[in-house]
Image (cartoon, rainbow, N blue to C red):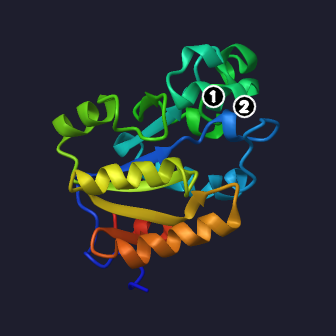
Amino acid sequence: MAALGLVHGPLGANALHLCVDMQRLFGPGSPWAVPWLEKVLPKVDALCTHKPERTAFTRFIPPPRPGDAIGSWARYYQRWEAVTGEAIGADMTRLVPTLERFVPPARVVDKRVYSPWTEGALDALLAPAGVDTLVVTGGETDVCVLATALGAIDRGFRVVLVTDALCSSSDSTHDALMELYTRRFSQQVEVARTEEVLEQWR
């Protein structure tokens, strides 16, 4: 396993905290509730508090109805009709209440699929700001965080995954993905805890 921590040194002025899908949609009472979300929320909150102006949130936005999705996503939402827009209402796609206070200055990027890169809004946000490093938190480790990290790697960003600020609904696949990140992507992904990130990002 690769060495853990910020092996490439402190974080610079062009780093940005990218918090993935910390929404009410994945909170208590939702069909998609992620049990760990509340556990990691204080760590995410600490990072947002540290640099609110250097924070961006992604939000996963389901279609209004299953038939509004394309291809295999239509079949997916036939299975998960309970989380389509008409079923859950707009409030469920909002950030969890604790994090809403950071917007603004934090920014929000909405997406309709796992990856935040496919629709261009995230690229449009990062490029003018000269961002070269992404500090990634949120959920889920093995779905939307994975898609976020792979897209960031492809674009050449320095990628830092904050281990105690990531959550998943599956312990086993969370653990498998953390092993994947540290073994297969050790040259392109750093894995660090919140305390170290806060200490090394001034």
Left or right side of 23 for 184: left
Q: Is residue 154 above or below residue 89?
A: below
**On-image quarter of the N terminus:** bottom left
Q: Is residue 81 above or below residue 174?
A: above
Mark 2 highlights which residue? Answer: 79
Residue 192 seen anywhere in this rendered image of the structure: no
> Residues at badges 1 and 2 in contact (C-beta under 8 Å)?
yes
**Residue 134 image offset from top left, x and y in percent:** 33, 54
Query: Is 141 or 68 nearer to us in this picture?
Result: 68
Disc 1 residue type (three-letter) = Arg
The residue depicted at 34 percent of the width and 71 percent of the height is 185
Q: Is residue 102 above or below residue 67?
A: below
**Residue 91 image offset from top left, x and y in percent:** 67, 21
Numbered tag placed on residue 141 in the rendering: none
Mark 1 highlights which residue? Answer: 75
The residue depicted at 64 percent of the width and 52 percent of the height is 41
Secondary-structure class at tag 2: helix
